Image (cartoon, helix red, strand yellow):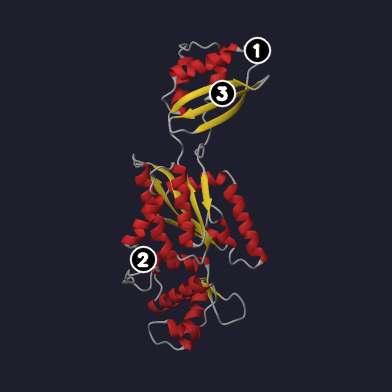
Amino acid sequence: MASDSTRRDDPGGQGLPGRSAMILREIVEAYVATGEPVGSRTLSRRLPMALSPATIRNVMADLEESGLIFAPHTSAGRLPTDRGLRMFVDGLLERGALTPEEEEAILARCRAEGRSIEEVLAEASGLLAGLSHAAGLVLAPKSEAALKHVEFVSLGPGRVLVVLVTEDGQVENRVIEAPQGLPPSALAQASNYVNARLTGRTLEEARNALEEEISAHRTELDDLTGKVVEAGLATKAGAAAGRALIVRGQAQLLADVTALERLETIRGLFERLEAKETLLRLLELAQASEGVQIFIGSENRLFEAAGVTMIVAPYRNARDRIVGAIGVIGPTRINYGRIIPAVDYTAKVIGRLLG
C-alpha cells in the first residue's frame, strides 16, 4: 500500500499543540505496529525532533489527563484510548493511496465474469479480510430479479410449498399455511394465474399488482385461492429482507487473543454478526454515509464492543442508490492508513459491477 501522502499542515490536528500531536501520533503508530505500550525513551528515539525523555513524560502526562492515552499497568509505557484513536484518525492520520497495481489486483479479484453477485461479494469480503488481518463484512443488496416461474405444491393437509424461480436462476422455497376448505384444484389454478399474469415482475411488483386486482375485483381467483397466492407472494417485512451478511476471516479476530475477557468479547461479536438485527443497523450506518465511516471501540453503535474497530463504506447501484455496505471489523489496532483507502476503493468497484 502506498504511503506517500504528506503530513497535514496543522500538525496539532483538532487543536492539539504540535508537540503533543506528534507524540500522540507516535504512540498510536507504535500501538498499531506492535500492540505494546510505548515509553518516553522509545519515543525520544522515534520522534523527528530532539526531545528529552523528561519533556516527553510531561507531554504524556498532559495527554493522559486529557483522556487520550492511558497506562495499562504500572510500567512507564502508554497506549491510546478510544478517544485518542479517534483524534488520530480524524486529525493526524496519514492516509495512503492505493497504487495502480493494488487497484488492478482488487479489480481482478472482484471481476464478475461467470460468477454470481453473491460470489463476487464473498470474494471482496475475503479480500478485505486478507488485507486487514481482520474480518471482512459485506451486506449484500436486496434481490430485485424478476420472477420466471412460480409453483404451488401440496405438502399435505394445511401446508403448501411455494417454489419461486427468478430470471437470474435463484430458487426460493416457502412453506405456507393453506386455508381450510381449499380444493385440490386451487393450487394448479394459483400456479397458472401467477405464471400467466405476474411473471416478469419482481416479487414486490407482483404482490402490488395482485393487491390492485383484488381491490378492483378484477381477479379471476376465488377467495380461498386468492389467499394462497397472496401468502405465497408475500414480501418479507423490513429493510433487511432478502439481504445477506457475508463475513469472511472471523478466525483472524482470534489470532492474537490471550486474555479470557478478550475472548468473551470476540465470542459476543460473533453472536452479533449472526443476529438479523445486525443487517438493519449496518444498512442504517451505510445509508447515513457518503463515504467511509470509522467506528472505534465503545463508540461503535453497531457492536458496542470495547477493543473493536469497524471501517465500512456504502456501495451504490446504477441508479446511484445505496444498496449495501462493505468493510472490515477487527481490533482497534487495525492499520487505518492501509485499510481505509482499500475499503473505499473496493466499495466503488462493487458499485461499478452492480451498474
Q: Which residue is mark 3?
A: 231
- Distance of mark 2 from mark 3, alpha carbons? 52 Å
Q: Amino acid at mark 3?
A: Ala
- Residue 236 placement (x, y as % from top left): 53, 32
Out of 253 and 48, give the one closest to the viewer.
Answer: 253
The image quadrant of residue 168 is top left
Can you tell which mark lies on residue 181?
1
Q: Amino acid at mark 1?
A: Gly
Q: Amino acid at mark 2?
A: Gly
- Residue 339 placement (x, y as % from top left): 43, 61
Q: For the residue carrying disc 2, how many other residues have a C-alpha within 10 Å: few (<14), some (14-19), or many (20+)?
A: some
Out of 300 and 168, give the one closest to the viewer.
Answer: 168
Helix, strand or loop status at disc 3: helix
- Distance of mark 2 from mark 1, alpha carbons? 68 Å
Please name the residue shown 56% across and 63% down the image. 307
Q: For the residue carrying disc 1, how many other residues have a C-alpha within 10 Å: few (<14), some (14-19), or many (20+)?
A: few
Describe residue 307's horizontal placement relative to residue 128 as left or right: right
Can you tell which mark lies on residue 17?
none
| Among numbered discs 2 and 1, the one appearing first in the sequence | 2
Q: Which residue is mark 2?
A: 96
